[in-house]
Structure formats: C-alpha cells, structure tokens
Image (cartoon, rainbow, N blue to C red):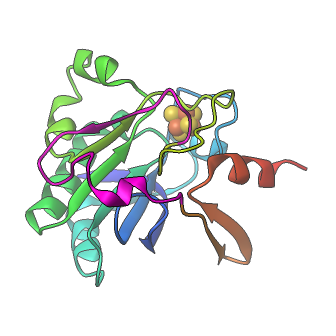
Amino acid sequence: MQLRIAQTVPDTEAEGPGKRFALWVQGCTLRCPGCCNPEMFAPDKGGQWVDTAQFAKTILQTPGIEGISVLGGEPFQQPEALAELCALVRAGGLTVMIYSGYTMEELRAQGTSAPLLATTDLLVDGRYDQTKPEKSRRWIGSSNQVMHFLSDRYTATDPRFGTPNTIELRFVNGQLTINGWPQAADAMRKP
Ligand code: SF4
C-alpha cells in the first residue's frame, strides 16, 4: 500500500514519550488557523509516496526508538495505508502515537477510522486552536486537545507525561526547524 508522507525525523524526543521516529503525513483539509505545517495541506502536491511495507522495515531498523509518532497533515485522511504501517511497526515491538485534528467522537463516527484506531496506543485529538496554547501538558499544542490512552502500553501516570515540554532545533536541508512547540514553529515562518 502507498502512503503519502511529508517529512520524517528518525530520532526525536519532542513528539512523544521516549525516543521516537516521527512521521508527518501529507494532506489535511481541516486547515486550523495558525497550523505550523500549511505546506502539508495539499493531499496531491508535496511530500512523497512510500510503500508501507518497505517504510515499516526502515523504521524497524532505526536503533534505540520506543515507537513512532504520526503527525501531519491529517493521519486519518490516509487511514488504510497508515493502519497497515502502524500494524507492522507494532508487530515489531514499537508503540504508535498519533496526533489527529479530528476529535475522538468524530473519528468513531467515521467508518474508515476503526482499523487505524485499533493500531494506536496513544491518540492526541482535536483541532489545533491557536487561541488556547497549552501551557502545562507535555506534547500537546492547544488546551482543547485530549490525550487518549488506547492500549496498556502507556498510562496517564507515566512520569514522563509530567516533565517539562521539550523543544528541539535542528537544521534540515540548510533550514532551521523546530519540533515540539507549534507556536514557535508557526512564528518562525512569519516574515
Ligand atoms: S489538523 Fe493538524 S495539520 Fe491539519 S490544519 Fe489542524 S493543526 Fe494543521
């Protein structure tokens, strides 16, 4: 199966618990004001297609990671291919964390979301709301968003969820990028 991805960071600690392979998918029709990844809106431009089985092998060969984090773009707008990828990496022992702009209620009402939800350990749901920046919860962009523990791989009492937020700066293709702080990433793009 083919999945359209926008970018990857193979070893980040700013997008979920532990060291993770972060993957941004291409395409999102939700268009939250202040989204820090507007170049990932178009479903048919930008990014690249990857074969899910091959890509899962690449992820599983990454040393020292605890899981993958899927961001976007909107993961649930490519639910079938992503469910296949997530099932493969989970079978290899990794955990799956997904950031979706849809609420859990919306996802449960969508007939296509069930297989991907079934392969998700941790879901952060809801539109990014730039008027409600999250001040205390780690790995959450705005205060309306909810963290859902969908398996026994993570619990709300995990001490890592109570530590201060992490920001990572790195150069990618000669450009400074920010992971882990949507407001800063959005501000950096503005002239
Ligand atoms: S759902 Fe995520 S990727 Fe889509 S517009 Fe909102 S913040 Fe951006």
Judge from the rendering whether residue 87 lies leftward or rightward of residue 173; answer left or right: left
* In the image, residue 89 above or below residue 35: below
* In the image, residue 13 above or below residue 49: below
Q: Residue at x 53, y 31 (%)?
A: 143
- Whole-percent x and y of residue 107? 29, 23
Q: Nearer the viewer, residue 91 or 1?
A: 91
Q: Residue furthest right?
A: 191
Identify the main secondary structure in magenta: loop
- Whole-percent x and y of residue 184? 72, 52
Residue 42 visible at all:
no
- Residue range (magenta): 141-165
Ligand 1 position by quadrant: top right
Q: Residue at x 24, y 81 (%)?
A: 61
Q: Residue at x 30, y 80 (%)?
A: 62
- Whole-percent x and y of residue 178? 65, 63
The magenta stretch spans residue 144: yes
The magenta stretch spans residue 56: no
